[in-house]
Image (cartoon, rainbow, N blue to C red):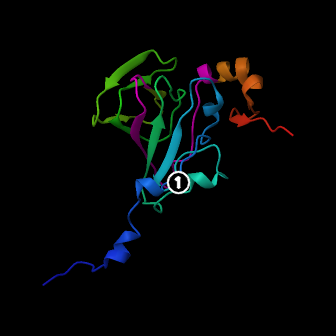
Amino acid sequence: MMTGVQMSESEMERYVARYGEMKSSDKAYVDTLLPDHEREIFNVIGPGPTENPGDANLEPALPAVEGFHLGYIRSQPGKRGALHAHDTVEVFIPMKGKWIIIWGDEGEHQLPLNTFDVITIPAGVFRCFKNVGDEEGLMIGMVSSTSEKPAGRVIWPEQVFRQVRELGDEYGITVNEKGDLVRLVTS
């Protein structure tokens, strides 16, 4: 007779992420410095995509699980992420609030998502999300990964680069020579 792996409650507790104990960061991505792009990122399972790898608040609640990252996105009404893409699939699942998913090179398409709906965005498609409700929203975001394509790369479209060129000095960000969004270092 085959038996499963036996674990005590204390051993299993190492595999639990308690929401009330999770850390979050409002500086995971450079675009969070732009107007109306403020949001919090919680890395629940494994390290997620970030442009601020030194932020201790982005330490995942649970260690990496091969193949994907799971995080929470908390956002106030009217706030959104900037259009971006990944080399891998991204999944969004609204848990609280009213959200729309926006996609296209200029953000020309959108779909509403209800609580517990699920959308998978193919690799390379520019996408973002916006809290269109009148209360704080919470959404699950998952990014797949492979050994060739880790979950850590954010790709920005020309629309975001234009906004950064127009407003960057005022908000402390710029585009570097490699085409990445970076924070301006102030002394």
Expressed as whole percent of the image width and height from the top left, the position of residue 28 reads 59, 42
Instruction: Report helix, strand or loop for mark 1.
Output: loop
* Crowd tier of the residue under label 1, counting other residues whose Cα lies within 10 Å: few below 14, some 14–19, many 20 or above: many
**Which residue is the extreme one toward the top?**
108
18 up-or-down from 155: above or below? below
Expressed as whole percent of the image width and height from the top left, the position of residue 23 reads 53, 53
Q: Is residue 46 left or right of residue 94?
A: right
Q: Quadrant of residue 34?
A: top right
Which residue position is annotated with label 1? Answer: 47
User: How many numbered marks have been drawn onto this rendered protein structure?
Assistant: 1
- What residue is drawn where x is 44% and y is 54%? 20
Q: Which residues are magenta?
A: 131-160
Q: Is residue 24 left or right of residue 165?
A: left
Query: 23 or 179: nearer the eye?
Result: 23
Query: 37 or 77: nearer the eye?
Result: 77
Q: Quadrant of residue 29?
A: top right
Q: Is residue 105 left or right of residue 183?
A: left
Quarter containing the N terminus: bottom left
- Residue 81 lies in the magenta-colored region: no
- What residue is drawn where x is 72% and y is 27%? 171
Quarter containing the C terminus: top right
Expressed as whole percent of the image width and height from the top left, the position of residue 144 reads 42, 47
Query: 104 or 113: nearer the eye?
Result: 113
Query: 86 or 115: nearer the eye?
Result: 115
Expressed as whole percent of the image width and height from the top left, the position of residue 184 reads 78, 35
| Dominant secondary structure, magenta | loop
Q: Amino acid at mark 1?
A: Pro
